[in-house]
Image (cartoon, rainbow, N blue to C red):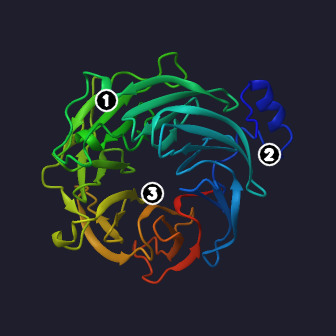
Amino acid sequence: MRLLTTRREFLASAATLPLALRALASPVAASPRWVLLGTGTDKGIFRAAWNAATGELRNIEAVAAARHPSFLAMHPRLPLIYAVNEAPEGDGALSSFLLDRESAAMKPLAQVSSGGNGPCFVSIDQTGKDAFVANYGGGSLATFSLDEDGALHHASAFFDCNHNPACGTTGPNTVRQNAAHLHCAVISPDNRFVLACNLGEDAIEIFRIHPGAEHPIEAPVRVAARAGSGPRHLAFHPNGLWLYCIHELDCTIDLYDWNVSNGQPAPVLRKDSVMSTLATNADLPGSTGCEIVVSPDGRFAYANTRGENSLVVYRVNASSGLLTEQQRIFTGGGITRHFAFDPSRRWLLCANQGTSTVTVFAHDPATGRLAETPKAFVVDTPMFVQFV
C-alpha cells in the first residue's frame, strides 16, 4: 500500500472523509463509541465498539495494517492517530493515520523512520506542532515536525544517548542496562519540557522544547535515579508540583518535587518517597514495574507490575504527595503493558500482552477502588488502549 507523504496528498485524502479536519474537535469524545488497541503483531491496530453502560468491547477486529503498533497518541485537535512501529530488528518507524470518528476507520497517511530500534512511546505537544518518540533499543529521542494539518515529516531533531558525552554510564544490571534505553516521552503540564526515562543509565533526561521551531529541543538536563532502578514511565500530579516515576527493574515508585529555576528543570527526589509496587520483596525475580497513572482529581495513583501481574491503587496524601497502598488486585491477565480509564472513569481497561486479553474493571471514582473480577475480551497481543 502506497503511503501519502506530501501535504497536497494529505489534504486531498482528508477531504474524502467526514470530520477529517475539524480543527476544534476534542481528541476524545465525552462519550466515546470506540476503543483503539495498539498491539505487538503485524496485524496492526485493532478497533472495538465500546459500551460505556456495560463496560463491554464488541466486534473486535483489525482496522489498520501496521507493524507492531505498540503505542499510540492522538493529535490534540485533529482526528489523527500516530503510532510507533516497534520493530524487533533494525530501525523502527512512526506512522500517521486519519481517523473517521463515526466508524473508527483508519486511513494510513505517512510513515517515517524513528531513527532507532524499538520505538516504544510517542507523544504530541499541546500545540500539535511536534511529535516525540522514545527509541528503547536505540537509546534516543527523536522529534518530528507536524504541519498545521498534522502532516508528518522526517525527524527534525535527534538526541542519541549512546553517542553523546552529555549522557552517563550504564547501570549495574549488565543484562538490562547494557546501553542507554529511553522508555517514554512525557510532556510537562506547561508544555515546556519533554521528559524521557533512561532505563539503561538510571536517569531521567529532561529536554526543553520549542514547538514548531527550527531547533525544537535543547540538550537535556539529567536527573539521576537510584542505581539499578531502571526508570520506565512518568506521571505528573494535576497540581503540577509532583512527579511520579515508576521503575521497571526494582519495581518501585519515586516522588520528585517538580521545580523549574531560571528556565531550567530542577526536580528533587523526595528521599522518603520510595514505594515498592510488589506485595513482598520475595516476588521480585521476573517482575517488572510498568505503568503509572494519576487520577484527574489527584486523589489516587494506579500502577501495574508484570510478572506479579498486579494492579495497585494508591491514595495520594493531599499535602505531601506521598502514596499509601489502598488496594491490590490481579490484572486478570499476563504481562499487562498499558492500562487506561474511559473518560467517565467508571471503567479501567488493561491490555494484557502476554495472555492476549483486554480486561475491563468497574471503577468507583469517589473511592478509587476497582472491582476485583473483571470482564475479559480476546485481542491479539494488546499493548495500548486509546478511547476515540
Residue, far right:
16
| C-alpha gap between disc 1 and disc 3 | 36 Å
| Discs 2/3, front | 2
Q: Which residue is mark 3?
A: 296
**Where residue 378 sits in the image (x, y, percent)?**
59, 73
Quadrant showing the C terminus? bottom right
Q: Secondary structure at mark 1?
A: helix
- The answer to whether residue 186 is above or below residue 252 is above
The earlier-in-sequence mark between 2 and 1 is 2
**Where residue 180 sits in the image (x, y, percent)?**
30, 37
The three-letter code of the residue at mark 3 reads Pro
Task: Give the side of residue 89 with respect to residue 150, left or right.
Answer: left
Quadrant showing the N terminus? top right
Mark 1 and mark 2 in contact (Cβ < 8 Å)? no
Residue at 36%, 29% (x, y): give it. Answer: 207
- The answer to whether residue 33 is above or below residue 366 is above
Residue 162, numbered circle? 1
- Residue 33 visible from this viewpoint: no
The three-letter code of the residue at mark 2 reads Leu
- Residue 339 visible from this viewpoint: yes
Question: Is residue 370 or residue 87 the one in the foreground?
Answer: 87
| C-alpha gap between disc 2 and disc 1 | 43 Å
- The answer to whether residue 297 is above or below residue 168 is below
**Where residue 64 sits in the image (x, y, percent)?**
70, 52
The three-letter code of the residue at mark 1 reads Asn
Q: Estimate how packed mark 3 is, as few (under 14), some (14 to 19) or many (20 or more) residues with alpha carbons within 10 Å.
A: few
- The answer to whether residue 220 is above or below residue 348 is above
| Discs 1/3, front | 1
Q: Estimate how packed mark 2 is, as few (under 14), some (14 to 19) or many (20 or more) residues with alpha carbons within 10 Å.
A: some
| Discs 2/1, front | 1
Residue 19, numbered circle? 2
